[in-house]
Amino acid sequence: MKTVKLGLIGAGGISQAHCRTMASIEGAEIIAASDLVQANLDRATENWGISKTFNDYNEMLEMDELDAVLVCTPTGVHGAPTVAALKAGKHVLCEKPMEAKLGPATEMVRAAHENGKILMVALKLRYSPQVIKAKEIVDAGTLGDIYYVETVADRRRGNPGGSFIRKATAGLGAAADIGIYALDTALYLMGHPKPVAVSGIASNELSLNNTWNPALKETEVEDFAVGWVLFDNGARMVFKTCWCMNMDSLGGTIFLGKQAGLRLGVMEVRGPQEGVTVYGDEEGEIKDETFTEFESVDVFQREDQAFIDAVREGKPSPIDPDGVLLTNVIIQGVIDSSEAGGREVEVSVPTF
Ligand SMILES: NC(=O)c1ccc[n+]([C@@H]2O[C@H](COP(=O)([O-])OP(=O)(O)OC[C@H]3O[C@@H](n4cnc5c(N)ncnc54)[C@H](O)[C@@H]3O)[C@@H](O)[C@H]2O)c1
């Protein structure tokens, strides 16, 4: 079995999880790393035995023996290294979300198509047993046509601070950090209908005026975002996310279909209850079914294994980047609408 040789761009916090996971996957090896911060490269060498290190990722990408690259830079810095890696002929596993802004995200997908390489965004919830179960239920036709969705990722006091609150690094806040999980999960279950119009609000009132952490008063990105989305098939979605709020919950994630409804409670997309519940009826009588027994899985392990298998076997990306790009179209729509005072904006999905 050929070993898949990997390079790391961005050796910060989340890269540690990928280093640990890749070390456990047979036939995968991280052989090089790049970061602007020397201490992070020294840690990569010390903890994970990565001896080839670079301050400039372009130099690392000149290594012929690299098959693929893990992009673990802050969200607003995903585009440039991903496009450079794809153009250098490397497959890419990029941390979530695809990018902060729609423009660079579009260039990432275009580069994947033009260079015939895998671009996988690390949306770990695709490997959650709850989401897999919900997808099976939807694909079996149990819900019928889905006409309305509310999808939520919320925290009461969870502004992460650090590079996550800076425009120059993260580019966006809660929508890109945790909202992305709610949005991607909803679009995945809905079968990726195309968004055509969005209105919304994005603000950071609570972080700027918070009483629990002075450092968060420097928040430059949104800590709260809500979007109202119209799709080309007529379906509508409410997308709600926040890092902090004076409330216990924004209500959870629900799907209304013409034959049944579904409630989803899963890590990062929690609601009033955990698991998957189908709300239906049988011969005129209400009949609900709840699934709460799920095996505990390491979603990082499954995600990274799927990437390595796809690289080795020449398969398409396990998470289609064209579908993920719809999350950028919607989030960009929310930001643009908010800047236009909440007025609806028309959106369109890039084609390649
Ligand atoms: N999947 C998950 O569960 C999960 C969890 C946390 C973060 N993330 C995502 O991972 C990404 C990184 O988050 P983090 O917490 O590791 O951030 P971090 O700030 O800890 O690490 C980012 C690293 O990138 C480096 N970097 C910045 N610009 C660079 C450049 N031009 N070239 C090389 N290196 C550069 C920084 O020096 C830093 O070491 C974010 O997009 C975030 O959304 C995912």
Image (cartoon, rainbow, N blue to C red):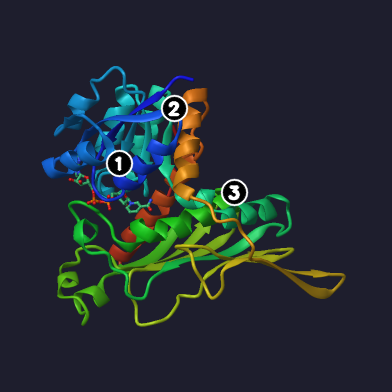
Residue 14 or 80: which is nearer the viewer?
Answer: 14
Residue 290 or 201: which is nearer the viewer?
Answer: 290
* Residue receiving disc 1: 104
Is residue 76 toward the left or the right of residue 214 in the image? Answer: right
Q: Which residue: 41% across, 64% down?
A: 199
Is residue 304 toward the left or the right of residue 101 in the image? Answer: right
Q: Which of marks 1 and 2 is in front?
A: 2
Q: Is the residue marked by circle 1 packed among few (<14), some (14-19), or many (20+) residues within 10 Å?
A: many
- Check residue 27 in the rendering and tell me which mark sits there, or answer none: 2
Amino acid on which disc 3 is placed: Gly
User: Ligand 1: does it lie within 8 Å of the C-beta at label 2?
Assistant: no
Circle nearer the N terminus (1, 2): 2
Q: Which residue: 47% across, 60% down?
A: 182
- Would you identify the image quadrant in which residue 143 lies? bottom right
* Residue receiving disc 3: 191
Q: What element carries label 2?
A: loop
- Check residue 241 in the rendering and tell me which mark sits there, or answer none: none
Residue 225 vertical placement versus 87 (above, below): below
Circle nearer the N terminus (3, 1): 1
Q: In which quarter of the image is the C terminus?
A: top left
Where residue 184 appears, as percent x and y from the top left, is 48, 53
Q: Is mark 1 on a helix, strand or loop?
A: helix
**CB of mark 3 within 8 Å of CB of mark 1?**
no
Amino acid on which disc 1 is placed: Pro
Where residue 191 appears, as percent x and y from the top left, is 59, 48
